[in-house]
Image (spheres, rainbow, N blue to C red):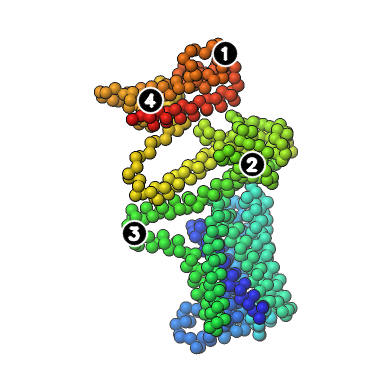
Amino acid sequence: MVLLHTTRLVSYLVLAFSLWLGIYVVTRSPKRLIPWLTGLTLWTIASLSMSTLLALDPPPEMASLPWWYQLLLPVWKGERVERAMSGWLNGWSVTPAIVFWHHITALIRPGPLNAWRRTRIIGAYVLLGAAILIQAYTPYLFTIPEAHPLYMPTLIPGPLYYPFLFFSFLFVGMSLVNLIRSASSAPTEMPRKQFIILTAATLIAGLTGPVAIAGAVFSLSVPIVIQSTLLGCAVGLIGFGVANYGALTEGRTIRRDFIYNGAIVAGVTILYLLVTWFSVTAYRVPGAAFIFVFMLVIITHSLVDVARRGLDRVFYRRDTRELRADLQRLTRMAGEQDSLDETLSLTLDSLCASVRATFGLILLFESEAVRVAARYRWYGDSLPFSQKDLLADDVGRLEQGHFPEPLSEAALLIPLYAESDQLGVMLLGRPINGVQYVLDEVDMLLYPSDRIAEAVRAAQREADYLRQVAELAAKSERQTAQSPRRRQISVKEVEDGFRHLTDYAYLGEMSLAGLKLVSTHLPQDTVTHVDRGKGVFNILVEALEKLRPTEDEPGRTPGREWYPYLILQRAYVDDIPNRDIMQQLYISEGTFNRTRRNALRAVTRALAEMETGTA
């Protein structure tokens, strides 16, 4: 009895998750061939679980059913249902899954399909078709004299049985070779991990062959639940591995989406398993009555989002559909905010592999703390420094021991700047077989580091935008009574204004020209864009003067309190080269850049406060 319940439970679980994973992979990338082949592989495994369940709870004989049932289930051989778990799907076994999987592993090999791989794929499908026809209509593969539904059936091998086994193991072996070669040639660690997962799935699924042979040829009492468990483990690894591989090739991540959808399907599966158990136990309802209902539940729950998008085309006008699509995109954006770390991990993995770094870290500044957003071959838990220890104006090559353990081997620090704000740093350990990075390797990392900073800033802005949208939706009734929010002034546009300080036409077309503060400096008669440019010039100079410590002119060696004002004044108003300013103030380039950024932030804030105070 325990074996019966265990076999039924495992078969239901494998059936549910094979159906769901196949649909999940296909719906996430519906225009690509690999997801469809993966779906066919998983659905074939689902059919094996379904046949096991029907063997445990046989349906009525075909003769006792209406004639139109035969149209719905043309492969149903009613007289064989009670004889073996594979009898009711006569001609269908694990063979299609082997062929589909071999096709997938050939497609994910790097480079285009060559003639040899294409020949192997075509040959596999030819052998599959021949095996199905032979098994369905002749005894040349095997015959099943009798079998118990809880154990692997004992077969009488036909003349083609052993050649059939040989080709099955041959294509499993070729699939393993494809995956191993793909893993060895993967450019970074993340896709290599996915290939390793798929290799493990192939090995686990391949173990079902020896298990089946032990029961079929050597007449051993091998429980069906062993094969079902092995296939269930392979199903999970295949579904996650292929879905994650597809996401990596498209530059996205699926981990949270995968767990989210998996949790929903798991909840539905558990609920219906309890309903099935209660109905069978309390009301003596045949278990076979729930198999197709159970399958339909998994399919409908997995396709509900796809069906909703399709029904939108029927029930809503185009403008309403576009609005609903925008809201759905906002929902996805809110769910993807936590995926920034995974995206950064992919990028860091690629960068560290390109320069052969021993380890890598992306550290982000959040409030007053430092957070590890991505790591590459670094397994420490605590960070031995604060934000002040990581402030830098430019790339710095570090000596060994610059940071305490466990980061004493850090050899390169790259600050991550967006506009004038440092968002964090990227730390790389020393290169493999080296002590320091050469200049070419450092230069190669600068552009990607800028893109990383832009991605972090974009994620922060998206999060702010989503919060604003949520607040707007929650306070829509009160929003009309509130005064409109004043436009934010960014450091970037203030710096752009200083760079074109004497170009009135350019200043007049900037967004700064729309400030109310500018209108106070405009003439009363006709106003042109040049006049607005002059107004922008005046407010920038006025805000700059707010940084002036005193009315008295500084001496020959001004104090540090004069640096912010003098750097902006001499660089933008007097148009003095930066090198001359550094020489006049006796400061380094790093101090100059840091002071200039702080000064621009101060002027921006002063402008915002001046705008707020404008009536």
Q: Residue furthest left?
A: 525
Counting residues from the start of the chain, the first of labels 2 and 3 encountered is: 3
Q: Does dot 2 land on a helix, a strand or a loop?
A: strand
Q: Are marks 4 and 1 in contact (CB under 8 Å)?
A: no
Mark 4 vs mark 1: in front = 1
* Image location of residue 399, percent across then percent down: 71, 31
The kind of residue on which mark 3 rests is Tyr
Q: Which residue is mark 2?
A: 361
| Residue at the image point whose x is 50% and y is 79% from the top | 74
| Residue at the image point whose x is 55% and y is 15% from the top | 558
Q: Are marks 3 and 4 in contact (CB under 8 Å)?
A: no
Q: Which residue is mark 1?
A: 557
Q: In which quadrant will I find the N terminus?
A: bottom right
Counting residues from the start of the chain, the first of labels 1 and 2 encountered is: 2
Q: Is residue 76 above or below residue 181?
A: below
How much space separates mark 1 and mark 2, taking CA atoms?
42 Å
* Image location of residue 435, percent across then percent down: 73, 34
Q: Which mark is residue 316?
A: 3
In the shown orientation, is residue 604 left or right of residue 97?
left
Q: Are marks 2 and 3 in contact (CB under 8 Å)?
A: no
Q: Quadrant of residue 13?
A: bottom right
Q: Does dot 3 land on a helix, a strand or a loop?
A: loop
Q: Which residue is mark 4?
A: 536
- Residue 566 visible in the picture: yes
Mark 4 vs mark 2: in front = 4
Q: How many other residues sit within 10 Å of disc 2, few (<14), some (14-19) or many (≥20)?
A: many
Viewer-proximal residue among 218 and 342: 342
Viewer-proximal residue among 518 and 323: 518
